[in-house]
Image (spheres, grey):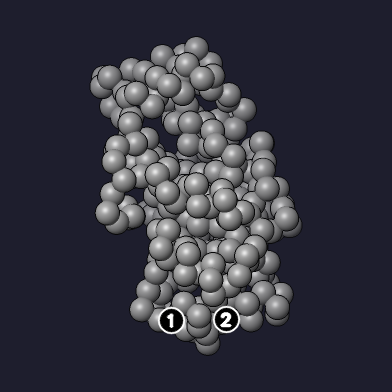
Amino acid sequence: MHARPFGSTGLNVPIIGQGTWHIDATARDGAVAALRAGIDAGMTHIDTAEMYGDGEAIVGEAIRGVREEVFLVSKVVPGNATRRGVARACEQSLRRLGTDRLDAYLLHWPGSHPLEETIAGFEDLRQAGKILAWGLSNFDVDDLDRALRIAGPYRIACNQVLYHLGERAIEHAVLPWCAANGVALVGYSPFGSGDFPNPSSAGGRVLAGIAAAHGTTPYAVALAFLTRIENTFTIPKTGRASRAIENAGAAKLHLNAAEIAMIEAQFPRGPRPRTLPML
């Protein structure tokens, strides 16, 4: 599995990880098997959140016995993101996950509590050894600027944002900001949350043609495209072990300039939106 430096953590992390939003909608045994298959295939970056229902408990079961191999990420909802609330929420996540630490802990989206309090809570947890690093999710450039002013350089490990073929808005400003400030960019919902290009569409046919040339799948082509830029990572979710193995294979796929141009032509990034898209 190809890995690259993950923001300010000093760690190399696989470019393709595993998301877990709605994974509790899958039969539990199948969800655990899919996560374990992904870990075995090198997708050791696993992302979850306190608001993901039974997601943390499922992840906890999947990583039992292999915790040391995993780069484990969870997220706090903004309503819990006071200085004390962050500490309480983290402890609850750790219990559900069956571990004593997180590798990264993120604020799920900008909220109403002062960001100074949230960051102070994150720093308390980092100093206590409960988390290795902290980051953000669904933050646009203005919010990122504010977080950087509060925290100082090289404290924000990552920004997790919506990024798929049909939604490339982050390429306008968020992705360049992250690259310039040493912040990893993690794209969530890389298959568009059920809106992956139809095989009969023009874009679907382009993906299928590229996939056939490489002996892989259109989904793998999409993942390779979304991680083509240094500093980017992606976290597809699946409840099937076979699909997890296919997803991991995308890390070995190198798209040439002509293939990238074909994909960009079918899935243009469009104009910069007024607000950052998110789910």
Instruction: Please state if 209 lies on the left or on the right of 252 as rendered.
Output: left
- Residue drawn at point x = 32 percent, y = 52 percent: 277
Q: Nearer the viewer, residue 128 or 170?
A: 170
* Place of residue 250 in the rendered image (x, y in percent of width and height, measured from the top left): 55, 30
Q: Quarter-wise, where is residue 93 in the image?
A: bottom right
- The front one of 217 and 266 is 266
**Residue at 61% across / 54% down in the picture?**
182
Residue type marked 1:
Pro
Residue 165 sits in quarter: top left
Q: Which residue is mark 1?
A: 114
Residue under the image location 58 percent in, 25 percent down: 253
Query: What whole-number distance in Å separates the C-alpha atoms at marks 2 and 1?
Result: 10 Å
Q: Quadrant of the N terminus?
A: top right
Disc nearer the start of the sequence (2/1): 1
Q: Is residue 138 above or below residue 1?
A: below
According to the picture, the residue beneath numbered tag 2 turns out to be 120
- Which residue corresponds to the image point at 33% horizontal and 31% vertical from the top-left? 268
In the rendered view, does 228 fall on the left or right side of 279? right
